[in-house]
Amino acid sequence: MTASLDNLQINYSTVSGGTGKNISRVLFDDCDGNNIEVNNFTPKNDCADLGPEAYTPTSEYIDWENPKFYTRLGVVDRSKALQIAIIGGSIGGLATAHALLKVGCFVTVFERGSRDRRRGGGGVAISDTSKAVLEALSIFSASADSRELLSPMRYHVDYSPSGFILRKGVIPFYSTHWIQLYNKLLDTLPSDCVRFDNELVDAEDLGKGKGVRFYINDKSGKEEGELEEYESDILIGADGNMSRVRDILFKPASEYVRDAGYRSWRGQLDLNNKSEVDFVNPLKESYPPHEFHVQLMRHSHAVLFYMPGNICNWQLFINKPNQTSNLRILKTDVNTKSNKLTKPALPEDLDRLHEFVRAFSPDRTLEKLIVASSKTTVQSLIIDHEPLASFHNGSNVVLVGDAAHAATPHLTRGSNMAFQDAYWLARTFVETKGERDGWFERYDLRVEDCKRIVELSRHVGRFRQGLEIHEFGQENILDFDSIDIDQFEIACGDGISGMLIE
């Protein structure tokens, strides 16, 4: 089977479904027009049960170049086009705007943050499918864009606490910088499409087919407290894991988020800096480029990969004290002083972090990397949500990205699910000719796969942190240095396969 889109070409031969069945030959695009050939690739567990489609972009993409499918941007009759408002202008909201513009909708994005504040972000791992979606949306207009923005990651490697390789498997992924991807998405939209400093305050669904009325606090020079009223045919919530759209327009609204039981520390380091040259080579010997590294430690783990420009991105997870397996936080307590979603690391925080790494890191190069990255280090609360039964409210409101299916980061699925939400929302719009009930029902076909990713990611993270114990007979497996590969894959739920679920 061959799936082709623009510069992406993935070939499969002798493919058979089912756990443990062999895919004899897989070719992955390396961003330079070349293919990396991997022989005797054996899929594991959940992903294999999806069949060969699990490893390839969906076989029937919208034919973006066929005028039957959409009205080209610039030719759209705004008086007749479906009026869509997107709340949230991060990468998921911007990708959704691109996709719906492509199929002839009139789209406006309302983003509460300022453009000037969109500077941070760490590394992002995107799949071959997401790369194909971004190419189809003309985000990557040429192979040069891919070489500049993307670096292939072709293996997922799990290391034991003492440093030996537990498992190494093929993944069709790329690394990139969040901010560069964000800027690319923003700069390729019409200039009047995104309104910054516009925060959703309230909204009212006017009934099926009658649209949504919503109220925006425009903070860009307006008087304090002055609200602007808007109406749209469809309102899309792309406003993240603390979605205001979901809380207002989806009933019953949950008062809680799920706390994973640990915090994340992350940072990045420019390895071109001459002051870091002494440990760059040892670092790359321990953790080679073009691989996604998971270093297990005692009740902790770190993730490390390299981004374009020779930048090393890392993330370390440290358990909170006195955690149980069933954790909830009131939404009203999130982003309070003790539960900030993301905050800079203070000097005393860094001291504790560095003490932890010195005690438990199996490799001094990892310790040196984290200490050298102190200026870029931030810490984050890790949360997700109970999966929703539907991504629409039965009327005129739809959710995408973390607003629909907030997940922990352990399968690198957050951004990828958002890009594929955007694609699927546009594709189902075309397939149903925009008929509201059929469109949203077709879009909801993503619910079960997204639910599976959310729950598997939560389990994988808590297992790696030693917060969930998997039993083999009477024996609890906690020692990653003594666990064998079969036990590890059963207990972990096979995170490699989870990364491949599309």
Image (cartoon, rainbow, N blue to C red):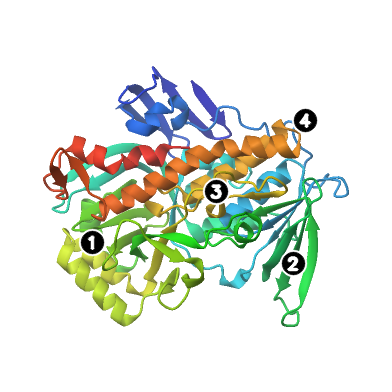
Give the amino acid type for the residue marked by disc 1 in the picture.
Leu
Marks 4 and 3, how far apart at CA: 26 Å
x and y, in percent, of residue 49 in the image: 39, 27
Q: Position of residue 173 (x, y in %)?
A: 42, 42
- Residue at 57%, 35% (x, y): give it: 445
Does residue 134 appear in this view? no
Q: Residue at x 16, y 53 (%)?
A: 161
Residue 68's disc is 4
Residue denoted by label 1: 366
Q: Which numbered circle lies on residue 386?
A: none
Q: Secondary structure at mark 3?
A: helix
Q: Which residue is mark 3?
A: 418
Q: Residues within 10 Å of mark 2 (few under 14, many from 20)?
A: some
User: Callout 3: 10 Å neighbours few (<14), some, many (20+)?
Assistant: many
Disc 1 vs disc 2: which is toward the camera?
2
Instruction: Name the amino acid type tagged 4.
Output: Lys
Q: Disc 2 marks which residue?
A: 215
- Judged by depth in the image, the label closer to the viewer, 4 or 3, is 3
- Identity, as a three-letter code, of the amino acid under mark 2: Tyr
Label 4: few (<14), some (14–19) or many (≥20) C-alpha neighbours in 10 Å: few
